[in-house]
Amino acid sequence: MRKYMLIGLAALLVAFAVYWIMVAPNGAAIRAEQEKAAAAARRGERESQMVQPPVIEDPRVAYAGIFRNIHPDVKYLGDENCKKCHEEICTTFHAHPMGRSASVAGSDDLETYGPEAKNPSQVGPYQLLAKLEDGKMVHQVSAKMGDGEELPTMELPVSIAIGSGTRGRSYLVMEGPLAWQSPISWFSTVKRWDVSPGFDLGTATQRPAVNTCLYCHVNQNEPVQDTINRYKEPLSSIQLSIGCERCHGPGEVHSKERTDGIAMDEHHPGIDTSIVNPAHLSDDLQMSICAQCHLSGKTRVVRRGREEQEFRPGLPFELFVNTFLAHPEAQFKNKAVGHFDQMEQTKCRTATGGKLLCSTCHDPHVSPSPEEANRLYLKTCIDCHQQKPCNAPELDRQKENDDCLKCHMPSTGSTNIAHTSLTDHRILRDPSAKKSSSVEERPDVPLVPYRAGELAETERERDLGIALSRFAEKQPPGSELRNRSLELAKEKLAASTQRWPDDTDALLALSTVGVATRDGAGALLAAERAYKVSPKNEDALAQLAFVADGMGKNELALRALNELLISNPSSQEFRLKRMVSMVAANNWEQAELDCRELLHTNPLQPTARLIHGLCLYGSGEKAAGRREVDIAMNLATSQQQRASIKAWFDRFVAWQAKAE
């Protein structure tokens, strides 16, 4: 057994607290917070004994529509079944980007693997390489020390490509039922490999592939309840890419009736009610089909008691997911958003009573050539504006070849995805003109639902509270908009969680608000209530661990982290957090075991290298410990991270010297 000679743990805990964001109080403040939390917990227990609300009625059963395949018992069959009667349109659809939303990695010739594709590519101290081995894609992340010594390589067997490749692709690494995004992506517009958007290799080389992402790219994935990135195997049992039924609904009834020659519904002449035809839906219901994947908003909130996967074409999307947009008078509304969100702002839609639809310009069944697409777009513009011709100067029009799109829908690089640009769908008279800000615009509530007319007021308030809590997290600390959003969120969530004490999502949002407003007791109470309601829920466990650590409740934090690692053993983030908590608890043996486990999976994790170095140094292996810290500093991706690593180690060495 390794003998550890380690001291100064209270100060070391403070050093590691940077990983937990919320600063823990101490002394009398801790006792006061704990007493406050205990009293609040007693109130929470009384609230939890309230009469539970009735089960929420399933919209797929309750909604009064003419199409019969919206019922939850109707099964999806896949495109191979559709192809039996609709071969031509199925073929053209699968040449469309939507029909290529996901595929087996390496199964086509989209990517190239030579030096001309920046393969390998250098990102800070890391080298990224993509390759095919026996027809299977593999991603490698490697690094070298300053003296040229090569560090162990992390190898990722890639299973699934996400995205059509029109702009790029990301990739999934499947570990049984667990889905992780690779840190390496392909960018089609520049034909090169690079680090995946949003990845900082110095802090993470692994990101959970959550349902919010896969819902829009994979045909029929089934998330396992209460988990972050666990799915029923296989990831999609019918087909990987989005299929016909995503817009037309499940095809079981339609296929059986047409195969058996059953007569169509005589009450709706000319309409086959066995399957949704969007042409026979209202404008709003047609837009709901597009909204399920193309309406991003400022945030999306899954309705209480519902799941995204339950949505069926022919139903209002907001009965399953409530999407919140910027208030029409908010100054931040025109910041980069999705195409759908932008189109909602255009006068071409608002001034026509919503007649402009996605399908007005885009045929979801066929992907025309760029030239043909441009011709069709211009025809659409002219069909509406032929009575009022363009009043731009003749010279400017000639310069742009009378191309409406170049002036009114320019491509912009205003996107958080590297190497890509998006088309401005606001269709402004002059997109370059900046909005006047002479008068401060301050709506009382910064967010509004896309549509929520059919929802009860209490449900709308609940969803708004969750939306505001998430929106506030993205605003600058201390800003008036952030503070106001947090205040509103707290008010609405407090009322909602009292009304529905078993609402895990609302409780977690309330806990998040408590963290942001430095109400440690409130944050802990809400996290504990969420945990009691859903003791296996990974989000609830993660929030409980986070808040408990910030409140100095190390034992509670460790218990939650232990449960998380039982549920999700390959999560590097959860293991790293437990490692830090073990150090704070003076459990260096377990911290070293976690270090070794994590470094076996990812030998290039700087913080794991640092803690391993502290373990070695404290046990007397000082040279080996210093070497690990040198590796950690070499793998840091910022000067700030490098300085923090050095400060932690220098402080630790000083403590050791004092002890000796």
Image (cartoon, rainbow, N blue to C red):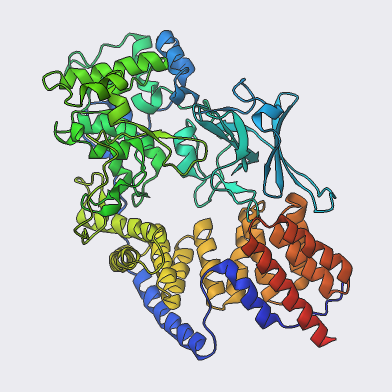
The x and y percentages for residue 207 are: 58, 48
The x and y percentages for residue 78 are: 46, 22
Residue 170 visible in rendering: yes
Q: In the rendered image of this protein, does residue 31 appear above or below residue 126?
A: below
Front residue of this view, candidates 36 and 579: 579
- Determine the residue located farthest toward the bottom in the rendered image: 28
In the rendered image, which quarter contains the C terminus? bottom right
Q: Is residue 532 left or right of residue 127?
A: left
The x and y percentages for residue 300 are: 36, 48
Q: Is residue 413 left or right of residue 589?
A: left
Q: In the rendered image of this protein, does residue 522 appear above or below residue 505?
A: below
- Determine the residue located farthest toward the left in the rendered image: 387
Q: Is residue 421 left or right of residue 233?
A: left
Q: Is residue 380 left or right of residue 335?
A: left
Front residue of this view, candidates 620 and 507: 620
Residue 1 visible in rendering: no
Q: Residue at x 72, y 78 (%)?
A: 651
The x and y percentages for residue 184 are: 63, 39
In the rendered image, which quarter contains the N terminus? bottom right
Q: Residue at x 38, y 66 (%)?
A: 510
